[in-house]
C-alpha cells in the first residue's frame, strides 16, 4: 500500500514546528512527521471489512493542519489516546475491489465514498453502541478512544485502503467521480445549515467562499430561498461563484461598515480601533474559524443572534467574548455530519447531500481546480494552502 500518513512522533512534531520558523522546506522533508511511502498490504481484518481502490481524494483543512503541523498539544482532543499513524484523506471516491464474507450489499466494481472516518462504535463493532451512535451521530461517539482498530488501514491519500462496511456509502451511477469526491464536504455544509436553518427575511452572513462556504450558500438557499444571504470573501472569482450559487450580495469595503449597511445596524467606533455594532445579522455561518472571524462574527450579530462555527483550528483561539453574554448570543458547533430531522423525516445529512447533488439542487461542477499525483503531494499541499489564483478544491488523481 503506497500512502501518505502522519507519524505521531513528538520529536518530529516539535522539530518540524521549530525548524519551520527558519525554512518552510521542512514540511514534507525527512524531518517532518508526514510520510509518503510503502506499507505492507494486509488481509481484510474481518468479515465486515472492504478493500477500496482510490480514484480521487480531496485535500481539506484538517489535512492541511496535519501537513503543516498546526495542531496544538493543548487542545482537548489531544488529551485522548492516539494512534501511531494518522492516515490522511477522507474526501474520496473509490472502487470496491474485495469484500468480507458478511458484506452482501457491496461487490467489486461498486463506487463508494467514505462517510465515517473517525473511530466510532460501528467501526469498532462495540455493542451496545453509545447513545450518539444509536442516533446516527457517529462523530459524537463516546467510545472514540475505547477499544482498538487494526493498524495500517490507510485512507484517501493512497492507492487503496481498508474500511469497515459501516464507513462506506455507495455512489449512484448518475454522480460522476468529480462530484462524488465532493459529497463529504457538501454534507458538512448541509449539516451546518440544518443545525440552524435560515428563516424567511432573515439576514444571513457566510464568511469564506471556499468549498464549505460555497456549499453553505447553496444549502441555505435551498432550505430557505427567501433569506437575505450575504457573503464575505476576499478573492474575486470566489465572490463571483458565490453570487452564481445563490448569494444575494457580496460585502465590500470596510467589513463593519458593510455589515451595518446590509443589516441596518448601528456602528460605533471607540478608542484604540475598537469597533462594534448594535443590531446586525440574524445568523452567521463562519466557514473559517480563526480568532479574527470569531471575534468579528459575534460583534456582527444582533442581540439573540446565532453563530455557527463550521471552520475550525486545531489550536486555541482568542476573541472578545463580551458580545456572547451582553447580546445573549447562541454559539453552535459543527462536527462534520450526522442525522437530521428534515421535512418530516429522519435522514442522514450525508445521504441527503447525495440526493441533492444527484437531483441538481447542489451544483458541484467546477469545484475541482487542481489535480496532482500522490508523488506530487508537496506541491499539492502548497497550492491548497496558499490559494493563489483560482483555487477551490485540490485533489489527488489516483486512477
Image: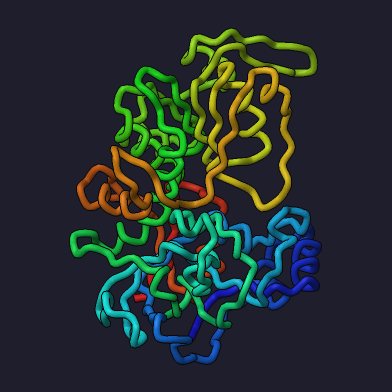
Query: Is residue 88 depicted above or below 161 in this figure?
Result: above
Q: Horizontally, is 392 left or right of 328 in the view?
A: left
Q: How many marks?
A: 0
Residue at 46%, 58% in the rendered image: 134
Can residue 254 be seen in this snapshot? no
Residue at 56%, 31% in the rendered image: 307
Residue 320, by quadrant, is top right
Can residue 27 be seen in this snapshot? yes
Front residue (pair 218, 231): 218
Residue 130: give x, y in percent of width and height: 54, 61
> What color scheme is it?
rainbow
Residue 389: give x, y in percent of width and height: 46, 47
Residue 361: give x, y in percent of width and height: 25, 42
Residue at 66%, 9% in the rendered image: 268
Front residue (pair 191, 178): 191
Q: Horizontally, is 319 left or right of 92 in the view?
A: right
Residue at 29%, 54% in the rendered image: 354
**Quadrant (top left/top right/bottom left/bottom right) for the C terminus:** bottom left
Query: Is residue 141 depicted above or below 294 in this figure?
Result: below
Q: Horizontally, is 232 left or right of 360 in the view?
A: right
Residue 265, by quadrant, is top right
Residue 230: give x, y in percent of width and height: 43, 25
Q: Horizontally, is 214 left or right of 309 in the view?
A: left
Amino acid at each position: 500500500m503506497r500512502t501518505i500518513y502522519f507519524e505521531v512522533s513528538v520529536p518530529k512534531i516539535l522539530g518540524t514546528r521549530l525548524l519551520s520558523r527558519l525554512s518552510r522546506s521542512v514540511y514534507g522533508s525527512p524531518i517532518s512527521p508526514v510520510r509518503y511511502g510503502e506499507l505492507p498490504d494486509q488481509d481484510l481484518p474481518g468479515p465486515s471489512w472492504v478493500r477500496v481502490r482510490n480514484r480521487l481524494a480531496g485535500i481539506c483543512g484538517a489535512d492541511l493542519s496535519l501537513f503543516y503541523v498546526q495542531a496544538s498539544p493543548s487542545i482537548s482532543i489531544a488529551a485522548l489516546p492516539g494512534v501511531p499513524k494518522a492516515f490522511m484523506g477522507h474526501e474520496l471516491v473509490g472502487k470496491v475491489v474485495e469484500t468480507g464474507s458478511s458484506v452482501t450489499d457491496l461487490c467489486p466494481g461498486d463506487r463508494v465514498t467514505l462517510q465515517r472516518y473517525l473511530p466510532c462504535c460501528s467501526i469498532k463493532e462495540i455493542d451496545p453502541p453509545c447513545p450518539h451512535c444509536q442516533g446516527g451521530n457517529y462523530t459524537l461517539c463516546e467510545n472514540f478512544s475505547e477499544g482498538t482498530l487494526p493498524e495500517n488501514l490507510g485512507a484517501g491519500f493512497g492507492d487503496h485502503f481498508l474500511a469497515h462496511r459501516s464507513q462506506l456509502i455507495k455512489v449512484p451511477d448518475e454522480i460522476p467521480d468529480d462530484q462524488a469526491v465532493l459529497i463529504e464536504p457538501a454534507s458538512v455544509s448541509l449539516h451546518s445549515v440544518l443545525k440552524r436553518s435560515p428563516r424567511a427575511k432573515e439576514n444571513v452572513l457566510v464568511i469564506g467562499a471556499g468549498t464549505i462556504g460555497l456549499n453553505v450558500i447553496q444549502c441555505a438557499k435551498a432550505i430557505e430561498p427567501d433569506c437575505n444571504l450575504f457573503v464575505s470573501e476576499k478573492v474575486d472569482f470566489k465572490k463571483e461563484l458565490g453570487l452564481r450559487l445563490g448569494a444575494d450580495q457580496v460585502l465590500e469595503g470596510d467589513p463593519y461598515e458593510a455589515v451595518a449597511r446590509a443589516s441596518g445596524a448601528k456602528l460605533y467606533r471607540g478608542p484604540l480601533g475598537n469597533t462594534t455594532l448594535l443590531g446586525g445579522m440574524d445568523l452567521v455561518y463562519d466557514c473559517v474559524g480563526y480568532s479574527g472571524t470569531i471575534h468579528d462574527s459575534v460583534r456582527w450579530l444582533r442581540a439573540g443572534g446565532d453563530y455557527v462555527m463550521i471552520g475550525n483550528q486545531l489550536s486555541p483561539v482568542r476573541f472578545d467574548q463580551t458580545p456572547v453574554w451582553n447580546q445573549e448570543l447562541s454559539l453552535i458547533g459543527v462536527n462534520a455530519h450526522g442525522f437530521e430531522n428534515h421535512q418530516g423525516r429522519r435522514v442522514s445529512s450525508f445521504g441527503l447531500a447525495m440526493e441533492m447533488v444527484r437531483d441538481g439542487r447542489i451544483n458541484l461542477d467546477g469545484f475541482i481546480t487542481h489535480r496532482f499525483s500522490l508523488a506530487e503531494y508537496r506541491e499539492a499541499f502548497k497550492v491548497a494552502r496558499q490559494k493563489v489564483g483560482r483555487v477551490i478544491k485540490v485533489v489527488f488523481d489516483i486512477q
